[in-house]
Amino acid sequence: MASTSRSSPRLSQNLWVRLAVALAFADASIVVLALPQIVDRLHTTISDTKWVIVGYNLALIVASAAIVVLAARLPSSRTLIVGLVVFGLASIGCGASNSMGLLVALRCVQGLGGALILSASLPVFAGAARSGDSPLNGWSAAAAIGAAIGPAAGGILTQLFDWRSIFFAQAPVAAVAAIAVFVVRREARGEIAAEADRPSSPLDPLTANAALLLLSAGLIGALFLIVIELINAWSYTPIGAAAVVSAIPLSTAATERLVRGRSPVMLGAAGAVLLAAGLLILAFTTHPQVAVAVLALLLCGAGLGLAYPGLTASALASGGSTTARAAKTIAARDLGLVLGLLVLTPVFSDRLNSVINSTVPQREATAALESAPISARTKIVLGTRLLAALSASGTTALPNIAPAFTQTEATAPASERPALAKLQGRMNVILGQTQRTLTHAFKLPFIYAAVFALLVLPVLAAGGALLRRRATRPPPTEPNAAASA
């Protein structure tokens, strides 16, 4: 009974540390579904809002690099508690921000807290792990699922409440995790357990980190581009988009459980191929097809579930303290996210803005309204409501014209209702053509993201070849033995 009572707080800490790891990894992408709303509420552009994500990840990279140097001086439990406090307070500040500049600055502070959380959580996680559990695998699995679930969680909160709720909701989770770590602190035991957990891997840690970097760059297509496409091109609500992208975490969680303990090289290669396949399906989707998008995202999630845990565990098997190893892997992974954003965002944002701001659909819609066989009064009423719908959609999405026609038909003469129905059909054709053009604007960025994922294959092949050459190289001859011979 005494043993059970002692292990119970440790298991509780394990749960909250796992949740903290997932939260910090999810925060790199949790705000994605809120970006269109942030664009309208803070009066900015999609291209500028990328810094809400980039700022967090850049700060996390810089802080992780500093932690690699200082790791030996950082007590894991206290560092984790400080990270959780900084992360939680910055989350509250982000939720209260009223300008892009302040939001990005506080996201950088969140990134600092996230780096402390992720780097210090591995030894603490190891100290709270049950006998026989693998801390590296458990930490890696929490990281993979957290990264995948971010957009869906953010979309649900945005739809039910507001984009600010994404950040406000993170603060209590960070607070409870900090309390759990404070109650049960395991400094030395966590470090020893994590050091003993190094597996013999056929994959060099440097190769694994490089593969994680490229995989993360490709993952931006599934976590960022698809969300913008669903909301801005396919006119989905945030919660509708969240339902679609929930295919990623569901597939990730299911796949990760099926392949534990297998070769990280094979899993990394298979995962990269599945991720690239899903991205290429999205690239060649010509119009809104939710079933095709879900299939593609299931493949992306399966690719993440296959590749991410094994590559992360191999990357964490490098030299140095547990905290330093975690910091190096975190920096590599987030550098990939930043690379993907910086390369892909300019490609699609220019195309997106040019299509939405094009005057051609507006001229066609105006001409259709002017030529419709309805009275001038009905045209004025409908035109006013269509302009209101256009204004409500903001500058980054197509308008929802159905309510305008429904309201106008309710008060229009019965003789004009067939003409209004025909006009609505014509307007829908114009919007459908625009939607197809918008969907096409995402083709090239999705292809670029798939290329990032496929570059994992030569990296893994080169790393495997290097390890084989090292294994077959004869051991160095002892000088004294050679002389005596």
Image (cartoon, rainbow, N blue to C red):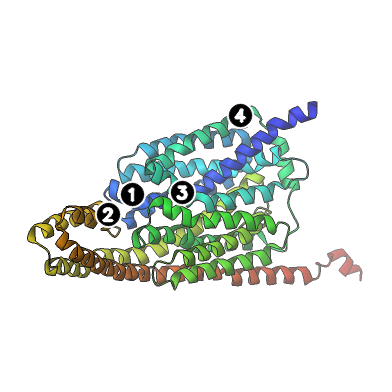
Compare marks 3 and 2 and give the one earlier in the sequence.
3
- The amino acid beneath tag 2 is Ser
* 185 vs 233: above or below: above
Compare marks 2 and 1 and give the one earlier in the sequence.
1
Q: Closer to the camera: disc 4 or disc 3?
A: 3
Give the CA distance from mark 4 to mark 2: 47 Å
Report the side of 377 relative to 127 (left or right): left
- The amino acid beneath tag 3 is Ile
The residue tagged with tag 1: helix, strand or loop? Answer: helix
Compare marks 4 and 1 and give the one earlier in the sequence.
1
Give the CA distance from mark 4 to mark 1: 37 Å
x and y percentages locating residue 91 in the rendered image: 43, 38
- The residue where tag 4 is placed is 182
- The residue where tag 3 is placed is 30
* 417 vs 153: above or below: below
- The amino acid beneath tag 1 is Gln
Q: Closer to the camera: disc 3 or disc 2?
A: 2
For the point 57% across and 36% down, the residue is 79
In front of the other: 54 or 410: 410
Q: Residues within 10 Å of mark 1 (few under 14, many from 20)?
A: some
Quarter in which the N terminus is drawn:
top right
x and y percentages locating residue 17 in the rendered image: 61, 39
Q: Closer to the camera: disc 4 or disc 1?
A: 1
- The amino acid beneath tag 4 is Phe
Give the CA distance from mark 3 to mark 2: 22 Å
Report the side of 104 relative to 42 (left or right): right
- The residue where tag 2 is placed is 393
Instruction: Count numbered badges in the picture.
Output: 4
Would residue 62 be seen by someone viewing this image from the given angle? no
Q: Residues within 10 Å of mark 3 (few under 14, many from 20)?
A: many
Residue 37: assigned label = 1
